[in-house]
Amino acid sequence: MKEKELFDVLENAEDNSMERLIEKCPEISDKQLDRILAMSERKFKMKNKEAQRNIKKTENNVVEGVERVKRPVWLTPLSTAASLILIAGIVIGSTAIIKKSGKKSGDDEITKPAVTAATETTTATVTETVTTVTVSGTTAGVTTYYDAYVTDALTAETNAQLTQSEVTEEETTESASQTETSASEVSADTELAKKFAGKWTYQELDDSVQTEPPLYNNIGTIDINEDGSYVASKIWGTFAGGIVTKGEDGFVNGRNVPTINFNIGDSDDIALSGWYNEDDLTVIYIGNGGSARIVRDTGNNSDVPVVTIAELAGEWKYQFSGDNNEQKDGGTVVIKADGTYAFDMDDGEVEAYEEGTVKIGTEEIGGAVFTTVGFYEGNNFSFGGYYNESKPDVISLGNGDVNRLVRK
Amino acid sequence: MTSKELADMMKSSPAKCHKALVREYGRYVYAIVYNKLRGCGTNEDIEECVSDVFADLFMKCQFDISSENDIKYLIATIARRKAIDSFRRLSVKANHMTDADEESMGELVSDFSVDEHADRSELRRVLLDKIDQLGEPDSTIIIQKFYYNRNSNEIAESVSMTSNAVRVRCKRAMDKLRAMLVEVGITI
């Protein structure tokens, strides 16, 4: 063994030593040489085939061509699949981000005027529709497909039929409800509808004049039925009706508020959305800037207040919305039967005392007359609100019942 | 075989040319490859490498090689390079992945030692000299026995002796070589 180890030193010899070792190399048998030749030929043919396929030699002994490299067969489908997964990921991710950023929080949702949203929705839908179909229908006065559709969806009375063009009007009849839209259907919230059933007036704030209280112009009417359907006058030109549904809670002035949606037909497209106070179901506020509102038509058109000073006399607790949607007490208002009042304000931050007179009046909103209660210091209006005989122990102060007086 | 002869033969019959090359230089290529792969490859690995050398050589022979001064040098160069490639491939297979942390990285040095390389080179020269001094056929028997790892029967064929005679001569030659190496300060 030791001898063999000694001869290991001959490995990797330099040229001189190599020559001497080659001289003493044993003869290789013919069988072994044939085996080597066969292997060499096989490898040579493979190499030659590959070279011939890619490279050609010219007469001048110049080699031209492009060396082809064999790529693994699985590489193409694998890279394609990876690309598709990547693209799908980007698309899904982008969609999710857009959806997420597009979906406002409750506060934002309320802050954004719903009128604008409704207008956008309606315009988009109508534009799309008008480019493809025109209408012939049995409903008198219905001139567009969209009107026909909404009316049909709402009352199921209109059998508007569509044709692909006016020229081929008689060839194709298809009900509007069948062809319409990819929007998914929703069902009306009848419980909600029962609370709001009745006639309502849609009003928008008149910015051109500065009055106290602000001046609202009547824009149109909305009739809400107890079965959840509603019919609106053409408030925005095309808006006709649909169903009412409960919306996601909004966030106004530091507290959560319920919302009501006016869906277009029975689709999930919302034409209008507003928020309201459970304590006061006479007003639906559109947005939180007071730019629009829907007020209930109480049928009381008389100018006579529904309450007297004497009936209001007593101690009232002043409440305002604090953080976390909590109603906080901000002091006590004592209304005396002689028409005076004393307001001992203490909301934890501000302490004040105020005295003055109480005046009861009326205010017409959307054709309906509301009883107002105003608190004056001398001739100056200090604060005030609305009194609803259905809630005799509450005086709502300002829009939205954010602040109020509650009888002690 | 000169490059001119090779080129002429290639023109007339490539297959014959290939066969002639293997017959002429097979042993030569084998010895070069064997020298590199002796410590890491099997006989099959060595044959595989030899066939790679000839495949490359055949490829080159397709082109005009008449300008080559000596085809032997070309073959030796191809053989050495192919053998080194095979050596690396086989070594990677047989080798070793080791964990090295940052501290030990600093201690890693090249395994090539100039001193050791010079010593081995000198030892190799002395050893071959002493083997040559044994004379024929003892030197051939010793080399084939201990370097080429041939058995006595195979050696007997190449030196035209009986296997018993080969064994006896091998033992005596080895004793003699050992004594000669001791004289120059090399002990086995």
Image (cartoon, rainbow, N blue to C red):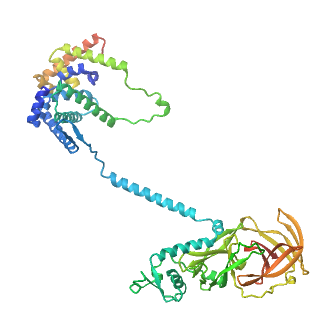
User: Which residue is rendered at x = 51% and y = 76% of the image?
Assistant: A126
| Residue B65 position by quadrant | top left
Residue B149 seen from this side: no
| Residue B161 position by quadrant | top left
Image check: A19 left or right of A355? left
| Residue nearest the viewer, comparing B1 with B182 | B1
| Residue nearest the viewer, comparing A151 with B147 | A151
Q: Where A286 sits versus B111, above or below? A: below
Query: Which residue appears farthest toward the top when viewing the image?
Result: B183
| Residue nearest the viewer, comparing A377 with B55 | A377
The x, y position of residue A328, in whole percent, is: 78, 68
| Quadrant (top left/top right/bottom left/bottom right) for the C terminus of chain B | top left
The x, y position of residue A166, in whole percent, is: 43, 83
Image check: A231 left or right of B102? right
| Residue nearest the viewer, comparing A261 with A19 | A261
| Quadrant (top left/top right/bottom left/bottom right) for the N terminus of chain B | top left
User: Which residue is rendered at x = 77% and y = 84% of the image?
Assistant: A389
